[in-house]
């Protein structure tokens, strides 16, 4: 490989680390290898050498100001490479894990969470449920607009904490989408339960207590309500029959 090719290969590994977090290179070495091979930026031997370097967890050996000869020797002993291949892998890896890049990653670490905590977040929810008594049904709808902010006691739940550990560069928008999905799932369940809980009385959709339910969700998830408004309606009672009799 030429110097220019090695620079491009290192640039791709840097792009992957910027996108997924530097830990991704160690945790998903085969995916990194496939992306490198698919790009055509490195030959088979060099791509395979980087794969074996990552599989062996050798990113843990890198330290600031590390000498290229020292790392190359470690690669030769651990991976069984000849001097030429270990030299290529060393040059690429030290370029990726430069002090400038490491400093940049440290600044980005958990940056998305910090921005999310400082912001206000708009959510929308459209609820739909069917009250069905066999001889007829009512389709119920609810449209809501909700704005929340994190409370002083906010901490990521276990699922989000696990995601941030895997992908520390998760953006504020991605975190917002995660909580929007969680809130929608909760409201879907509550609306379905409200509309179908009584087999004898048609639900009054406009009486669905959106405020109460959103506040309850906020208490469980570390948020505060800025505003919460919505409207409910139904399509009217539809009898279940056809020409000649009931279904």
Image: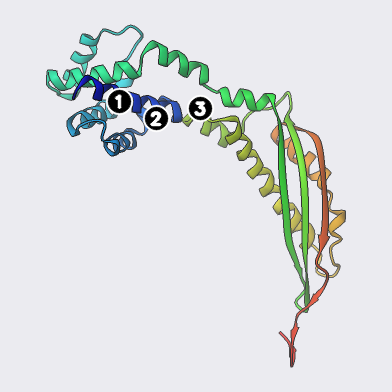
Lower sequence index among marks 3 and 1: 1
What's the colour scheme?
rainbow
On screen, 8 above or below 196? Answer: above
Residue 31 in view: yes
Residue at 44% across / 26% down in the picture? 18
Q: Secondary structure at mark 1?
A: helix
Residue closer to the observer: 40 or 63: 40
Q: Between marks 2 and 1, how big is the CA–CA gap?
A: 13 Å
Res 220 → quadrant: top right
Provide the residue designation for mark 3: 169
Residue at 36% across / 8% down in the picture? 64
Lower sequence index among marks 2 and 1: 1
Provide the residue designation for mark 1: 8
Res 95 → quadrant: top left
Q: Between marks 3 and 1, how big is the CA–CA gap?
A: 23 Å
Question: Where residue 16 is drawn, which disc sits there?
Answer: 2
Residue at 86% across / 67% down in the picture? 201
Nearest-to-viewer mark from 3 and 1: 1
Residue 61 in view: no
Q: Secondary structure at mark 3?
A: loop
> Are discs 3 and 1 less than 8 Å apart at CB?
no
- Horizontal and vertical percent for residue 145? 77, 44
Lower sequence index among marks 3 and 2: 2
* Mark 3 neighbour density, 10 Å: few (under 14) some (14–19) many (20 or more): many
Q: How many discs mark residues in the rendered view? A: 3
* Mark 1 neighbour density, 10 Å: few (under 14) some (14–19) many (20 or more): some
């Amino acid at each position: 490989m030429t110097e220019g090719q090695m620079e491009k290969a290192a640039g791709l590994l840097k792009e992957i680390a910027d996108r997924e977090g530097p830990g991704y290179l160690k945790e998903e070495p085969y995916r990194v290898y496939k992306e490198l091979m698919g790009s055509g930026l490195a030959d088979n031997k060099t791509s395979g050498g980087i794969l074996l370097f990552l599989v062996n967890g050798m990113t843990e050996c890198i330290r600031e100001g590390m000498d290229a000869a020292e790392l190359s020797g470690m690669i030769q002993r651990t991976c069984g490479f000849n001097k030429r291949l270990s030299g290529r892998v060393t040059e690429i890896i030290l370029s990726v894990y430069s002090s400038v890049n490491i400093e940049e990653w440290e600044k980005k670490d958990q940056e998305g969470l910090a921005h999310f905590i400082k912001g206000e977040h708009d959510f929308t929810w459209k609820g739909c449920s069917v009250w069905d008594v066999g001889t007829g049904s009512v389709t119920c709808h609810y449209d809501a607009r909700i704005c929340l902010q994190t409370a002083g006691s906010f901490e990521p739940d276990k699922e989000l904490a696990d995601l941030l550990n895997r992908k520390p560069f998760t953006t504020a928008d991605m975190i917002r989408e995660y909580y929007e999905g969680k809130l929608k799932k909760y409201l879907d369940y509550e609306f379905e339960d409200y509309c179908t809980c009584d087999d004898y009385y048609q639900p009054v959709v406009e009486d669905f207590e959106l405020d109460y339910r959103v506040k309850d969700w906020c208490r469980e998830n570390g948020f505060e309500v800025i505003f919460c408004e919505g409207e409910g309606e139904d399509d009217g009672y539809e009898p279940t029959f056809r020409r000649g009799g009931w279904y």
